């Protein structure tokens, strides 16, 4: 496929991701050639931007041919059926968790859809993310197992999850994935924040007449920034949009956001996320964000951010940054030990069996990281 | 004088409305209902309590269709949605 068609598809997706917010982008009706439609649609689907594309087409800002519109609607219909299935499962899990005495906070997808976005159909999502307190972690895993959700990957060693983990993915009936979170992000930033304290920043929201908990808009903004900056490289367009959407429409307490960003060492992360909004979507932060963005990141934060956003990510950068964020030599040793000598069950699940599921196979990965690191230092 | 019954969406259903379509799901069911065109418009009207007559008037205006034709369709739609527990008679009546 010619590069120009791919480039046009990517440009369209970026424009769609900024639709409805004050941006530098094109304001005239935007259209896409038939040659470029196929990669553009694939990219819109992959980036979960069909809702914004449908809204843009409805508003007359995106001009599509009849067949393009039909394909877009078909894709979006599938996405909407999927999200309603997820919400159905969420309501069912709510009842089970409540009966088990485990409180949880809903993260990401459903809370963005039913929160800062003008219409829930603008914000598709693919899975369910639930945050539980550290003390409830084991119980919550048992509740999911009892409901037919099976953990994809066992923990490296007993107790590793509660001390160093971010979340465990459980796959349930019909292929729905539930990410059970202990904290918001893997690595140093997940360790620097106070996950249980997030429950003090939770508020109620209604879904089909039932009450659930979600992060308030201030904490939601910081979580969105973490997800946009630390989740994918390059950032996922919808995650960058989430940051801009909460900043523009959410009831953000900007002073509290500044205090939390300082406390949780997120100054560099927040800057990076808003920077991605400017660079990728042409959306500038609101004036109220000035104090938050004026925070000057510490050197350690910048180094930690680079472990996610540069080539260091593929050279074990996150693991090394995590070691630096863990308090005390005994805990550092426990983390490294868990990575080097994980349980056999973990090895087999992680490496897919065969030679690669041996300790030797696992250590080869670490040596490869070191070699890449050495090469880049020599360069 | 008895007033016409009024209906509204059940507060207990899940749905997404976009373009001229709505996907509706009962929280305890397994299937999904797809409403499109006038049926989707009718669903959107039911965000507030409406009588059949009010809906017929609104939809025949919007779609430039004879009231009698719209009235038959709306009656069937309301029966169907109510039977599936997706709409409720208005409690404020």
Image: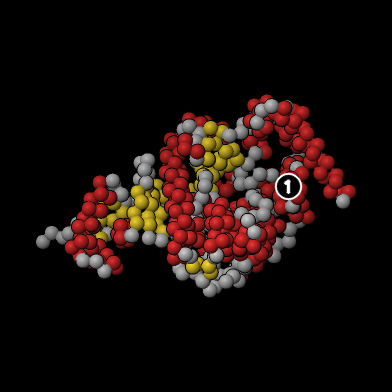
The image shows a total of numbered marks equal to 1
The residue sitting at the right extreme is A378
Which quarter of the figure has residue A94?
A: top left
Residue at the (76%, 36%) spot, across then down: A365
Q: Chain of mark 1?
A: A
Give the quarter of the figure containing the N terminus of chain A: bottom right
Q: Position of residue B34 (x, y in %)?
A: 36, 51
Residue placed under numbered mark 1 in the picture: A313
Residue A49 against residue A284 in the figure, above or below? above
Element on which disc 1 rests: helix
Residue at the (22%, 61%) spot, across then down: B70
The residue sitting at the left extreme is B1
Q: Position of residue A151 (x, y in %)?
A: 56, 33
Q: Nearer the viewer, residue A209 or A42?
A: A42
Residue A136 shows up from this direction: no
Which quarter of the figure has residue A361?
A: top right
Residue at the (25%, 62%) spot, across then down: B55
Q: Nearer the viewer, residue A265 or B19?
A: B19
Q: Position of residue A210 (x, y in %)?
A: 40, 47
């Amino acid at each position: 496929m010619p590069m120009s068609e791919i480039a046009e598809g990517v440009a369209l997706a970026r424009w769609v991701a900024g639709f409805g917010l004050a941006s530098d982008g094109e304001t005239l009706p935007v259209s896409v050639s038939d040659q470029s439609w196929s990669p553009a649609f694939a990219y819109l689907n992959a980036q979960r931007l069909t809702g914004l594309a449908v809204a843009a087409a409805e508003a007359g800002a995106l001009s599509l041919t009849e067949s393009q519109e039909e394909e877009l609607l078909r894709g979006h219909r599938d996405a909407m059926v999927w999200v309603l299935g997820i919400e159905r499962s969420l309501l069912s899990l709510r009842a089970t968790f409540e009966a088990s005495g485990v409180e949880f906070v809903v993260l990401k997808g459903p809370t963005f859809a039913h929160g800062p976005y003008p219409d829930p159909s603008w914000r598709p999502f693919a899975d369910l993310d639930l945050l539980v307190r550290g003390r409830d972690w084991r119980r919550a895993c048992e509740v999911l197992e009892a409901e037919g959700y099976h953990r994809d990957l066992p923990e490296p060693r007993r107790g590793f999850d509660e001390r160093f983990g971010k979340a465990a993915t459980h796959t349930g009936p019909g292929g729905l994935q539930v990410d059970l979170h202990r904290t918001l992000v893997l690595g140093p930033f997940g360790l620097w924040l106070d996950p249980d304290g997030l429950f003090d920043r939770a508020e109620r929201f209604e879904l089909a007449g039932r009450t659930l908990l979600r992060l308030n808009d201030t904490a939601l903004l910081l979580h969105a920034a973490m997800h946009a900056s630390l989740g994918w490289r390059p950032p996922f367009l919808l995650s960058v949009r989430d940051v801009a959407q909460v900043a523009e429409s959410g009831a953000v307490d900007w002073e509290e956001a500044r205090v939390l960003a300082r406390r949780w060492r997120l100054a560099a992360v927040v800057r990076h996320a808003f920077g991605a909004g400017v660079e990728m979507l042409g959306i500038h932060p609101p004036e109220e964000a000035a104090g938050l963005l004026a925070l000057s990141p510490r050197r350690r934060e910048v180094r930690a951010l680079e472990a996610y956003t540069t080539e260091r990510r593929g050279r074990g950068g996150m693991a090394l940054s995590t070691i630096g964020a863990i308090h005390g030599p005994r805990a550092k040793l426990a983390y490294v030990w868990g990575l080097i000598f994980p349980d056999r069950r973990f090895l087999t699940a992680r490496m897919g069996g065969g030679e690669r599921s041996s300790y030797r196979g696992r250590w080869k990965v670490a040596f490869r990281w070191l070699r890449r690191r050495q090469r880049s230092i020599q360069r | 004088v008895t007033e016409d019954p009024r209906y509204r969406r059940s507060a207990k259903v899940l749905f997404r409305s976009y373009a001229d379509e709505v996907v509706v799901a009962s929280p305890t069911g397994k299937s999904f209902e797809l409403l499109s065109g006038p049926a989707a418009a009718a669903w959107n009207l039911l965000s507030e309590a409406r009588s059949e007559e009010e809906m017929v008037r609104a939809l025949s205006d919007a779609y430039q269709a004879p009231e009698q034709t719209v009235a038959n369709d709306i009656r069937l739609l309301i029966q169907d949605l109510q039977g599936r527990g997706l709409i409720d008679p208005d409690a404020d009546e």
